Structures are given as C-alpha cells and as structure tokens.
Image (cartoon, grey):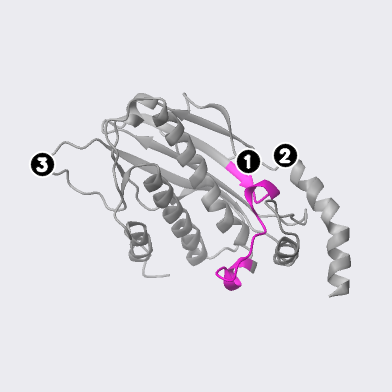
Amino acid sequence: MLRLNTIMRRLLPLTLAAGTAACSTSFETPTTLSSSAHLVAGERRLLAVEEFADPAALAQLATLYLPPVVMAPAADIDPDISPARLDDVRLQLSRDLCQRLARAGFSVEPVRHQPGTAPVQRGDVIAAVTGIRRNNVATTGMSRLIGVAVPGPFNPRVPLGIGALGVEAEILDADGRQIAAIRWASQNHLASGGGVTTILDGADAFTDLADVMDLSSVFADALGDLVEEARAGADTAERGETPRGTCNAYEALIADAVSPER
C-alpha cells in the first residue's frame, strides 16, 4: 500500500498537467452527414466540435426516431476489435443517446411507429461512429486506482494509452432536411470524468474499450445540450415523453441484426 501511495504521488502532477492540455482528438474520415455546409466551430464541455442547429425547426419536434447507432463505412477503428465488441459500443451509444434525448423532452422511438390520428412532428436521428482508439489496460487501471484514491470532481489520468471515440450525428425533419448536426471526437481526458470506477462497473471498467464506453455518454450529452439549447431559444410547440424502458430495446434490435456467420 505504501508503494502504491508513492507511485500515485509521483504520477499525480503528470496527470493533472495532462488534464489541462487540449484533449480533443480527430479522425480523418469521410463524413456520413447528409450535409456539412451549415457546420460551424463550437465547444461542448471543453471540447472543440463542429455543430449546427435550427432552433425553430427543432422546437416543432415532439418525437424522434432513433435507430441503432452504426459504424461509419470508412470509420478509423483500431484493428482486431471483434464485431461483437463493436456491437457493444453501438449498444452503449444507442442507449445513451436515447436516454439523453428523452431528458431533452422528446418521445424517442427505437422502432419507427406509424403516426396516430393526431398530427405529430417527427424527426430522424442518424448517428455513426467515425473512430475508435483502444486504451491501454494497465494505465487505465492505474488511472482508476488514482481516481478512487484522490476524491474530488476531477479524476486524474495517467497520460499514456488513453482511448478515444469519434461520433457524428444529425437530425432530419420529415422532409429529410438537416435541422441539427454535430461532429465530435475526444480522448477520455480528465475533464470528461474518465477514471471514475464504481462497484457497478465491474470488470468492464478495466477492458481496452473502457474509455470508449465512458465517452459514449459524453457524446450523448454534447448532442443533447446542442438540441436543448437551440429549443430553449424558440417557442416549443410540444414536448414528448419517452415511456420507461424504451431505451432497453436496442439490445434486441442490435442482436437481431447480427448476421448468422457471427
């Protein structure tokens, strides 16, 4: 225990210094967005992003159809990650996006429903993973031990072998017109909350995709914040409500889509 404390004291200044540096990353991949013409530089929770939102159009939406997140055709993904583990990433992102957009005041539909008798403004959310970098298991484990030993709002990371995730998403109106979009990529840096471990995380907190899984909710928050801020500046016609348990549907949707050869 004494030796661990000594190691943590030596590493803490390094991790704090790493946390103050620019920790965004980028993946040079072709976009899957229907258009990039309206994207402008922005910042979401200390991260540089490209984004666009049409407040008036977003304010008219009550329901969003959100199919499972996909892997972009030209995604920059570390080699030797099995299809099953990539599906785990898709599942995490799909759930996180569903929950965040539900909190933003939408009725989120994992499966497209036919409109009822009352007219409802619907939008389509399309999200794709553009890049994945695995984390080093050993340094992630050390970072998480430090995070447990050093209480506070920030959790230091050993500045080696940090994982990264890239995602982009857009919302289209009923006519297929883009009314919101974001391109986002990040390492699991200090400010994102990386390094937090609880008993609920279990063994998954120490895998080589642990950082990617942590970053899933950070991306979901970035899109949710973009949409909420845009709607706050306009007269919202209607708010939707997502029934409890809706976001659990993605596990079956992704499993059902897995090809037999897997």
Residue at image x 37%, y 25%?
234
Depicted 235 relative to depicted 108: above or below: above
Which residue position holds label 2? Answer: 22
Secondary element at image label 3:
loop
Q: Quadrant of residue 195?
A: bottom right
Quadrant where the image shows the N terminus: bottom right
Quadrant (top left, top right, bottom left, bottom right) of the C terminus = bottom left
Q: Residue at x 82, y 56 (%)?
A: 12
**Residue beneath label 3, please?**
117
The residue to which callout 1 is attached is 26
Q: Nearer the viewer, residue 86 or 15?
A: 15
* Circle 2: residue type: Ala
Q: Nearer the viewer, residue 105 or 211?
A: 105
Question: Label 3 amino acid?
Answer: Thr
106 vs 51: above or below:
below
Q: Quadrant of residue 251?
A: bottom left
